[in-house]
Amino acid sequence: MAHTPLSLDDLAAITTRDRQGGAEDARLIRPLRHEVMNGAVQDIVHLDAKLEALYALIAKHRPRDALRGFHARCSGRFGPEQWGLPWVRGLTIAGALEEAAAEMSALLDQPSPPLALLAEAERVFYLSGDVARGQEMSQRLLADTSAPMPLRVRAGRRLVHLGQAAYVAKAAQDVFARLPVGQPGAARPDLSRPMRGFVISLDRAAHRMPSFQAAMGDQVRITRINAMDGQTLTDVEITEAKVSPRAKLTANEVACCLSHRAAWDAVAAQCEADEYALVFEDDARFIHGPGAGLAAATGAARAAGAGLVFLNISAVAQVLGRPATREGLQIRDIPTIHREGAAAWLKLKAGWGAYGYLISGAKAAELSAAWAQWRCHTALDWQMFLMAFPDPAEVQPFWSYRRGLNLLRAATAPRPSVPAHVCTYPLIETDDYGLSSIDY
């Protein structure tokens, strides 16, 4: 039975009833707890009333250990401990946030405030309703090349929610342009002959192709791959594509997997084993101009013996935990980066995307064969990441919360190993980086 959210009057009544409120009140605990832990935090007044009513209900109808457990969960969701139970200090949540915002404003007057202060101020201003100051903090974090990538990604999310997607896209490019080293060169073609490019595109999105071809310039010879459409896949096709009926994949995720496999088959059939090709989704664009950086990336990939190299901006940001390296453009294998401990991106929810990568004919054939054996476990970009690790124990502790990951242990087919690399300076972004390459 659906639960109707309680009004402010109903919530106030709960907190004034005596213990004899009985089973009727006790039955409200679970739906109200769900509202508090999963609802929006913008409505501070209503949230404050919900929390106070919920604490009152738990105190009346549950043992004290339940109250302590819920207090800990609220503290984790809403910030410092005093925000989990603010009325103990005679404050509402709104009052606590007003106090915190005033304190943050005073601290921000100091010259060169530390990043940790900017990040905390960003959160406090948004929660207290001062959106303008919160937006200012988000913009400062996004533009700071020394800020850890998780902080900058979060700032980008918040700006996109405020309708600032265009600002996020421009800011990302501006940050890369300001880095002192590591840029792949001016925005000019740098290949002696066009490289093969295979673009995955839906029939019902054919209007994207002209702009995509214009963005590629004459440095990439395009072959279109007809994308599988999740809206037209049958239940039988979806079931056959998944490794197990328990694999929680949407029809669109299955279609994405099958579309990329079709691209790998095309690369394997049309390219020599040691020839490199590009695989794109049709919203991909070169960051620095048509073809810029491809020659350097391809040469570095060949020297490193890399058969699969992610070139897209979100892969670089999440694998390295920062936008680029001061050593310049390099090709690094992902398991080594992971073992070196430079994997702050593991804490992010965002996928790194598969909208722009370099692949050899031999590796495309290997990847397609592995997929035929392993089939679909989870979203394509995560699965390509998992297949890069020969030993699942290397990633299992970090990924146990990812949906479908536990199916790795249950898979009956031998586990394939398809080593993946990343280019330390991104060459590819999506048409709307702010909306498409980060999970909002």
Image: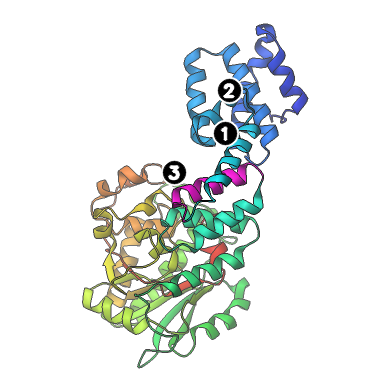
Q: Please state the extent of the stretch shown in magenta in the rendering.
A: 112-129
Specify whether residue 116 is painted magenta: yes
Along the viewing direction, whichever of 297 and 42 lies nearer the viewer: 42
Mark carried by residue 89: 2
Residue that label 3 marks: 246
| Residue receiving disc 1 | 37
Q: In the rendered view, does 110 fall on the left or right side of 232?
A: left
Residue 20: quadrant of the picture: top right
Residue 248 versus residue 421 in the image, above or below: above
Label 1 is placed on what type of residue? Met
Q: Residue at x 31, y 76 (%)?
A: 360
- Looking at the picture, which amino acid does disc 2 mark? Arg
The residue furthest right is 9
- Percent of width and height locating residue 411: 32, 47
- Element assignment for label 3: loop
Q: Residue 304 or 167: which is nearer the viewer?
A: 167
